[in-house]
Image (spheres, rainbow, N blue to C red):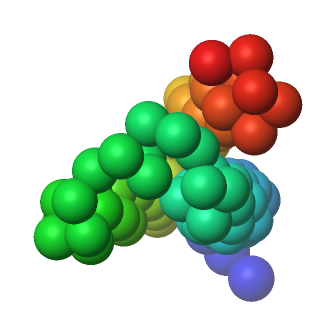
Amino acid sequence: MPVSNRPAQRHIAGMNWATLLIFVLGIANFAVGRAVFDNGHPLLVRLPPRSQTLGRRAALVSEFAVLFFALLLSVEGWPGYAFAYALYTAVNAGAAWLILSGRV
């Protein structure tokens, strides 16, 4: 194996852990979102059914867009976005905890 290929292989291996981390955190974010919407929070229950449906879809689409672009950037050589997405997940989990525990 030529010496010049070794740094490229290390770079690819670095992208794999970031991509895997973002993927797993993305699953967690979708699960947290589902738990919040299925919770029956009084604020969500007061909305008309049409608004509830549109709100759920908008949340899923925006969550997918954030996940998609974080994965895309990590695969393109920006593994630092894994830490940014982890911070996003922590904030998301904190907000969900506030809603699910009845503090909000």
Q: In the rendered image, which quarter is residue 102 located in?
A: top right
90, 42: nearer the viewer: 42
38, 86: nearer the viewer: 38
The image shows residue 38, relative to residue 2, as above or below, that is above
Counting from the top left corner in percent of width and height, residue 27 is at 67, 69
Quadrant position of the N terminus in the picture: bottom right
Q: Residue at image x 75%, y 39%?
A: 100
Left or right of 62? Residue 101 is: right
Q: In the rendered image, which quarter is residue 16 located in?
A: bottom right
Q: Residue at image x 16%, y 70%?
A: 50
Q: In the rendered image, which quarter is residue 15 located in?
A: bottom right
The image shows residue 74, relative to residue 4, as above or below, that is above
Q: Residue at image x 33%, y 56%?
A: 59
Q: Residue at image x 22%, y 59%?
A: 48
Counting from the top left corner in percent of width and height, residue 4 is at 59, 62
Quadrant position of the C terminus in the picture: top right
Counting from the top left corner in percent of width and height, residue 61 is at 27, 66
Residue 61, can we see it?
no
